[in-house]
Image (cartoon, rainbow, N blue to C red):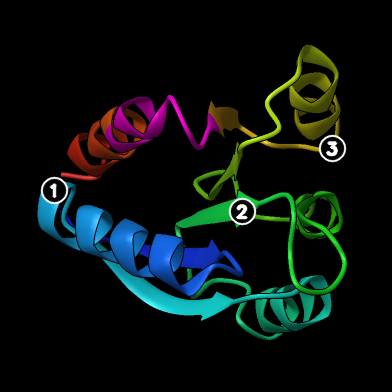
Amino acid sequence: MTFKTYLVEDNPVIRENLVGFLEEIVDATVVAHASGEDEAVAWLRQHGESWDVAIVDLFLDQGNGLGVVDACRQRSAHQKVLVVSNYATPDVRARSKALGADAFFDKSAEIDLLLDYCERLSRRND
């Protein structure tokens, strides 16, 4: 079953690749995207139930992904927040989880794990 994904990624090439992977491999629909924290937080507040999964990069054009993750604390139980970053230190992973992220993926080495996670979410919604 298709799930609605909100993507917070400032790099257009990475964003385009993620959209392609998500839509082709895991049957997700990317409903919107943002490249900065303020834009992402505003969209999330205005569209509370319009997404199932938010995929959030940590380093953004404006602000950072941790602020976006924190803004998702009041989400519904079915909504998942996934962090992706090239800066995948144990401290950053722990901070992301402490702010409410459901999972963390190293952008340079764990994209396959991100897709597997999304595929499991897709099957759960069937």
| Labels 1 and 2: the sequence-earlier one | 1
Report the label total.
3
Residue 3 badge: none
**89 or 76: nearer the viewer:** 89
Q: Nearer the viewer, mark 3 or mark 1?
A: 1
Q: Is residue 119 depicted above or below 56 in this figure? A: above
Question: Is residue 20 toward the left or the right of residue 6 in the image?
Answer: left
Tell me what residue is drawn at x 81 percent, y 20 percent. 94
Tell me what residue is drawn at x 51 percent, y 65 percent. 7
Tell me what residue is drawn at x 50 percent, y 37 percent. 107
- The alpha-carbon separation of the residues under discs 3 and 2 comes to 13 Å
The location of residue 121, given as percent across then percent down, is 31, 37
- The alpha-carbon separation of the residues under discs 3 and 1 comes to 29 Å
**40 or 78: nearer the viewer:** 40
- Amino acid type, callout 1: Ile
- Amino acid type, callout 2: Val
Magenta residues span 106-115
**Dot 1 corresponds to which residue?**
25
**Dot 3 corresponds to which residue?**
99
The location of residue 26, given as percent across then percent down, is 18, 47
Q: Residues within 10 Å of mark 1 (few under 14, many from 20)?
A: few
Asked if residue 107 lies in the magenta stretch, the reply is: yes
Question: Is residue 7 toward the left or the right of residue 42 in the image?
Answer: left
Question: Is residue 30 toward the left or the right of residue 79 in the image?
Answer: left
Question: Is residue 125 toward the left or the right of residue 78 in the image?
Answer: left
**100 or 125: nearer the viewer:** 100
- Amino acid type, callout 3: Leu
Helix, strand or loop at disc 1? helix
**Dot 2 corresponds to which residue?**
56
Tell me what residue is drawn at x 61 percent, y 53 percent. 56
Q: Is residue 75 depicted above or below 89 in this figure? A: below
| Labels 3 and 2: the sequence-earlier one | 2
